[in-house]
Every structure is written in C-alpha cells, then in structure tokens.
Amino acid sequence: MTAYVALLRGINVGGHNRIAMADLREVATGLGHGDVATYVNSGNIVLTSDRADEEELGSELADAVRERLGVAPAVLVRPAAELEQVAAANPYRAEPDPKKVHAVFLPSPPDDGARRAVETALARAADRGSRDEAEMVARVLYLHTPDGLGRSVLAELLSRGVTRSGTARNWATVTKLLEMCRALGG
C-alpha cells in the first residue's frame, strides 16, 4: 500500500462548495482506500491505496465526490514520496512563518509559456513594489509572500493564468500532510 495525499481544489472557500470532512472521509473509504484521514476543512485527504496511477485516483475521487456530495472539485493526488521531494525542494525554508510560503500543486510540469508567465508576473509585481518571490520546481510553484497571501500582488497576477489549474497549500499544511503520510509509513 502506498500513502497518498489528495488535494481538492475550490471546496469550503468563501462559503462555496461546502463539504463536511466526515463525508469526504466516507467517500474515500467507500472507494476502498485505507487509513483515510482529512486535515483542516479545505479538502486535504491522506490515504493508502494499492493503486499506482495518481491521475486515476484523482479522477475516481472527483467523480465520487460529485456523485455523492454534489460538488465537482478538481482533485490532484500525489504520492507521499513526491511530497517528500516537495518539502526538500522548498527554496524558502528560511522563512520562519509557514503561512507566508505556499506550494501551488500543478497538474503537470509547467511548459516554457508558463515559466515565462511567472517571470512576467514577478517583474510586474516588483514594479508595483511587491517583495513576493516565486520559483517553479517540477509540478510545484513555490510562492513566498512576506506581506501575506491576501496582500500578494504576485499571487493575484498568477491566479489569472499559471495557478488557475493548480491548488495551493500554505507551508504549515504541507508539513502537516507530510507528517501524516510519514505516520502511515509512506
């Protein structure tokens, strides 16, 4: 059995697409996954499965949530080993406040156009006085927002394109999910 984290995009945000975490755990357990646990009320599931195809797992979870709970979130699934890599690659580990570092999990590695869009957004944000930083590594865009995500010029600029298909988690959440995966032996 492999430990995975499933990240649901766009649920329980601003009162929209409400899903109780108990219901979400029931859906995942009903699909035959083991050790199902959720973390905070924003669609983070840790589970074990004998299936190896993360895209298939994500599609299956998304379909089941839509059918049983009436909400259609995008679901990105990553094995625990990849979450370990995400943690190791964090270029902003020196930031003491984990809520000022975010990992935007993308469905696929960014192409050259996405990389150029990030560079353009960084330049535009800097021109507006932003201290925000960003770096892409594999399928993750790391954001460092020293003035907070809610005030981030860069996050706003990126939300219109590059990060639209991804789902972001602050570093406190990433490290907690990794801790939960490790507890499963993943």
Image: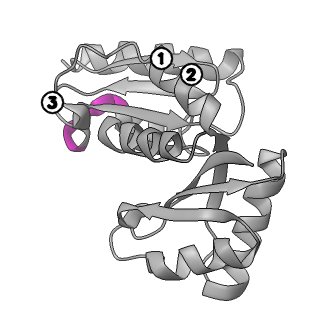
Taking the spot 63% from the left edge, 30% from the top edge, the residue there is 81
Question: Which numbered tag is attached to residue 170?
Answer: none
Quarter location, residue 139: top right
- What is the C-alpha distance between the residues marked 1 and 2? 5 Å
Is 73 in the magenta? Answer: no
Question: Which numbered tag is attached to residue 85?
Answer: 2
Q: Which residues are magenta?
A: 150-154
- N-term mark: 3 or 2: 2
- What is the C-alpha distance between the residues marked 3 and 2? 26 Å
Taking the spot 48% from the left edge, 45% from the top edge, the residue there is 183
Q: Please count the marks in the image.
A: 3
Q: Where is mark 1, residue-wise?
A: 88
- N-term mark: 1 or 3: 1
In this rendering, position of residue 95 left or right of residue 134: left
Residue 184 location (% of width, % of height)? 55, 47
10 Å crowding of disc 1: few (<14), some (14-19), many (20+): few
In this rendering, position of residue 87 left or right of residue 77: left
Q: Amino acid at mark 1?
A: Ala
Q: Is residue 5 above or below residue 21?
A: above
Label 3 sits on a secondary structure element that is loop
Q: Nearer the viewer, residue 56 or 166?
A: 56
Q: Amino acid at mark 2?
A: Gln
Residue 143 location (% of width, % of height)? 38, 26
Residue 132 location (% of width, % of height)? 27, 21
Q: Is residue 141 above or below residue 155?
A: above
Label 1 sits on a secondary structure element that is helix
Q: Is residue 8 above or below residue 93?
A: below
Q: Where is mark 3, residue-wise?
A: 147
- What is the C-alpha distance between the residues marked 1 and 3? 24 Å
Q: Amino acid at mark 3?
A: Asp
Q: Nearer the viewer, residue 167 or 84?
A: 84
